[in-house]
Image: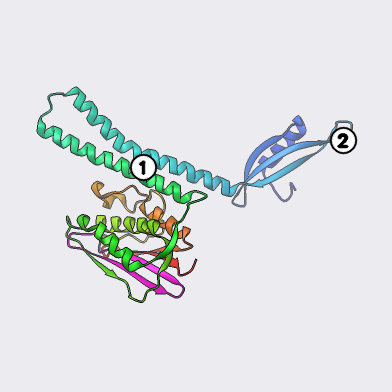
Amino acid sequence: LLEIVRDATLDRVINDAFDHGGPVRSELTLDGSQIELHAVATRNQAGEITGVLVLFHDITELKKIDQVRRDFVANVSHELRTPLSILRGYIETLLDSPETSRKELSRILGVMERHSKRLDLLAQDLLTLAQLESVNPNLQLGNVDLSNLFGEVVRDWEKKLVPKQLSVIVDVPPDLPTVPADRVRLQEALYNLLDNAVKYSPEHGEIRLTARQRDEEIVLSVRDSGIGIGKEDLPRIFERFYRADKARTAENIRGTGLGLAIVKHVAHLHGGHVEAESELGKGTTIRVVLPVRM
């Protein structure tokens, strides 16, 4: 064993087990894998130590999961800290300056309202993500008519399209089959995709909602004419809290950083997947690919 695994940590674990007899635990990296070691001395009938039993446990995946958890907690803390700090700062200002002018007071309350809404959105998205990642996400499956669903979603978003005077084009073939899906979850995914499209589209831009059959799959796509995403960022946009090129994203259009992660989870729960296509300055297309049959 020592000839195969040449590592100082293993030598130390074995020597410690020989010296003290009791169980010894340690970790080492072996060919890129994280290995947990447990060693205990073996004894004969007279109680003399005759050798050492070493147990190797590959904990690589556990380490990755733990790192994801740590990153998630750090990101949530960061996302909460900014609006909370701003709210606390303005509350202190109001307490210290009771004679604040009406104009300044109106400005402060506007900022506080904006950041309180940001906290509310973050809480909602975190709750949604937790439900989607749970052992029992409780999908309510039914046959969803995509033409009807797209029409509903666009009607819900009409007011949000007005400030930028955006136009939405819905393109669904009349003979497209229904898709087996949880209508509420699918609607949630489309809301998140439309939210991104609206935020990053220029004034008088165009957003296109399309559904097509591709072999045994139904492909739902949302395309915008916005700022686009760089090649280096594209593979990571479905990660939680990942934002493409923060320097190019104005603070007032940043979301919670969870929208596309929610979209990905909705697709996966339906046995599907997500795709992304983009080019800087030429817009972005996000696709939700679902099986025709589950």
**Residue 285 lies in what quarter of the image?**
bottom left
Q: Can see residue 19?
A: yes
Mark 2 or mark 1: name the one nearer the start of the chain: 2
Residue depicted at 42% across the width and 74% down the height: 214
Expressed as whole percent of the image width and height from the top left, the position of residue 68 reads 48, 46
Quadrant assignment, res 168: bottom left
- Measured in 3D between alpha carbons, the distance from the residue under mark 2 to the one under mark 1, in whole angstroms, is 60 Å
Q: Which residue is mark 2?
A: 44
Q: Position of residue 154 (x, y in %)?
A: 26, 61
288, above or below 34, in the image: below
Up-down relation of residue 277 to residue 65 (above or below): below
Amino acid identity at mark 1: Ala
Instruction: Give how far across and how far down residue 86 sits, in percent.
Output: 26, 34
Q: Residue at x 34, y 54 (%)?
A: 244
- Residue 279, position in %: x, y? 31, 64
Instruction: Please tell me in which quadrant of the rendered image residue 202 appears.
Output: bottom left
Residue nearer the viewer, 64 or 160: 160
Q: Is residue 151 above or below residue 124?
A: below
Mark nearest the camera among 2 and 1 is: 1
* Three-letter code for the amino acid on which mark 2 is drawn: Asn
The residue singled out by tag 1 in the image is: 123
Span highlighted in magenta in the image: 201-226
Q: State yes or no: residue 19 in magenta.
A: no
Residue 223 visible? The answer is no
**Mark 1 neighbour density, 10 Å: few (under 14) some (14–19) many (20 or more):** some
